[in-house]
Amino acid sequence: MEDMDENFTLSGDINGPLLAAVISIEMIAGLIANSFVLILTICHIKTWKQLSTIFLTNMLISNLLIVLFVMLFSITTAASGEWLFGRTYKQKMKVCQFTGFMFWFCVIVITEGLVLLSFDRFFYIVKSFEYERHMNQKISIIIVTLSWLLAALLTIPPLFGLGRFSFSSSYGICVPHWEGESGYVVYMLIVFIIFIISLHN
């Protein structure tokens, strides 16, 4: 990401109110769409017999997490022109790390969700007899739970020194910092190459 710094102010080249308005529209649309589909899914109990519903619900929840835990911070920062979360620099950094972690965690959970949905459809279509014999609701929920735990493990390295989360003056949120973090770049490149290969197989 470009234009990253630690002064927690939005870049002068960015029209803050316009950015806040655009993200607000995205947030409202995302909140309505994801919530509507999630409520419909929950209300139709019969759909839970289809295991793909569990993987789809997983994606809906992860999308809602981004809407609720990331976009609000970005809207507030864009509207005010600066990061308002925390009084001292240390407090601002802690909230920044939390939002950066949540943002990247959600990105990885959504990516994993796509991989799981892809695998589920592949095995259901190509190996339907084995699928019906080995897959059930309990196994699907365990797989989704493990994917969230894996996402947390893959996201946590910047909190322990491998890479870092940093404020992006271009977007008004905290995201992974790539510049000068070659070890972290290689680490995440390997992770996403594995995900991409999984999607294509």
Image: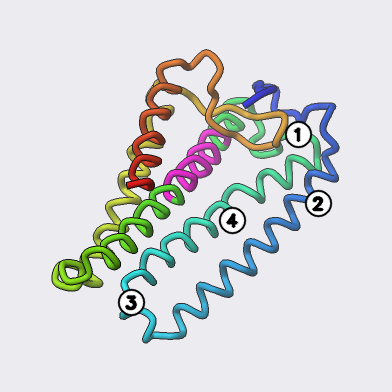
- x, y percentage for residue 85? 65, 39
- x, y percentage for residue 135? 20, 68
Q: Nearer the viewer, mark 1 or mark 4?
A: 4
Q: Residues within 10 Å of mark 3 (few under 14, many from 20)?
A: few
Asked whether, in this view, residue 118 is left or right of residue 67, the answer is left
Residue for point 60% across, 55% down:
67
Residue for point 85% across, 44% down:
17
Q: Quadrant of residue 53?
A: bottom left
Q: Which residue is mark 1?
A: 82
Q: Which residue is mark 4?
A: 68
Q: Quadrant of residue 27?
A: bottom right
Q: Which residues are magenta?
A: 96-109
Q: Which residue is mark 3?
A: 50
Q: Is the magenta region chiefly helix, strand or loop?
A: helix
Q: Residues within 10 Å of mark 1 (few under 14, many from 20)?
A: some
Q: Nearer the viewer, mark 4 or mark 2?
A: 2
